[in-house]
Image (spheres, coloured by chain):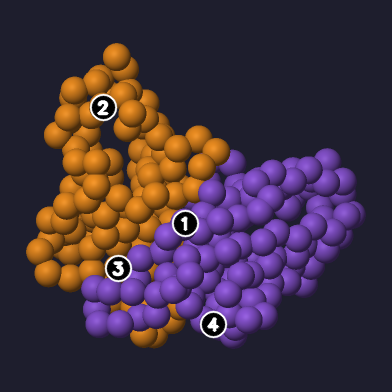
Chain colours: A purple, B orange
Amino acid sequence: DTGVSQNPRHKITKRGQNVTFRCDPISEHNRLYWYRQTLGQGPEFLTYFQNEAQLEKSRLLSDRFSAERPKGSFSTLEIQRTEQGDSAMYLCASSTSPGDRGSGNEQYFGPGTRLTVT
Amino acid sequence: AQSVTQPDIHITVSEGASLELRCNYSYGATPYLFWYVQSPGQGLQLLLKYFSGDTLVQGIKGFEAEFKRSQSSFNLRKPSVHWSDAAEYFCAVGASPRNAGNMLTFGGGTRLMVKP
């Protein structure tokens, strides 16, 4: 088990460009989450998938953001027409399905992708 | 809506001293509570969790936390801090995974510094 991996680890882009991040969850985990963390703040939920279905999106996820998980394994998060306010750490997490209370709830986080928009 | 407050933005303790990090939550039902630690430039590592049962839960690295429903608190403690514990600590609350995706709501974090 190699844990949750994210690529790239760092991305610097110019305002107006599109960027795409990838997340590979723990292999047996069917839930995958995206969070955004700005400097000095706690992570904020963006969206989550159960298998390939995107089941919830935060109002933080503007129309410029799109996430996919086409085969229920890895996921991509794309930001179109980046703005300086998009600069943040983008974190991916995964978990198992809910089971009995007390199981299937822990989310395991990847190292994150730090985006800087200049 | 659920929320988490970590009243202390920064805490400095001497190595070997005891530690308590405060966390207060707001949630309408029985919460799922977590503490995560984040080292600079890294993702979050789960320290411990509370779902039900014994209100004192043990975690990794010698940490423990106590759930107090009457105070809506879930404070993190360690009897003797090591220099390697210097990091940012986040408390989080989640909904029942059966009702929602169990997205987590995080507090603003407490940065722990350890003096030699």
Which residue is label 1 attached to? A2
Q: Earlier in the sequence, mark 2 or mark 3?
A: 3
Which residue is label 4 attached to? A51
- Locate the N terminus of chain B by quadrant: bottom left
Label 3 vs label 1: CA separation? Answer: 26 Å
Q: Earlier in the sequence, mark 4 or mark 1?
A: 1
Q: Amino acid at mark 1?
A: Thr
Q: Are marks 3 and 1 on the same chain?
A: no
Q: At which x and y percent is residue A103?
A: 28, 74
**Is there CB contact under 8 Å for labels 2 and 3?**
no
Which residue is label 2 attached to? B82
**What numbered label is drawn on residue B32?**
3
Label 2 vs label 3: CA separation? Answer: 28 Å
Where disc 2 sits, the SS reads: loop
Label 2 vs label 4: CA separation? Answer: 40 Å
Observer-nearest of B2 and A22: A22
Label 4 vs label 1: CA separation? Answer: 19 Å
Observer-nearest of B62 and A8: A8
Q: Is residue A118 above or below residue B101?
A: above
Label 2 vs label 1: CA separation? Answer: 27 Å
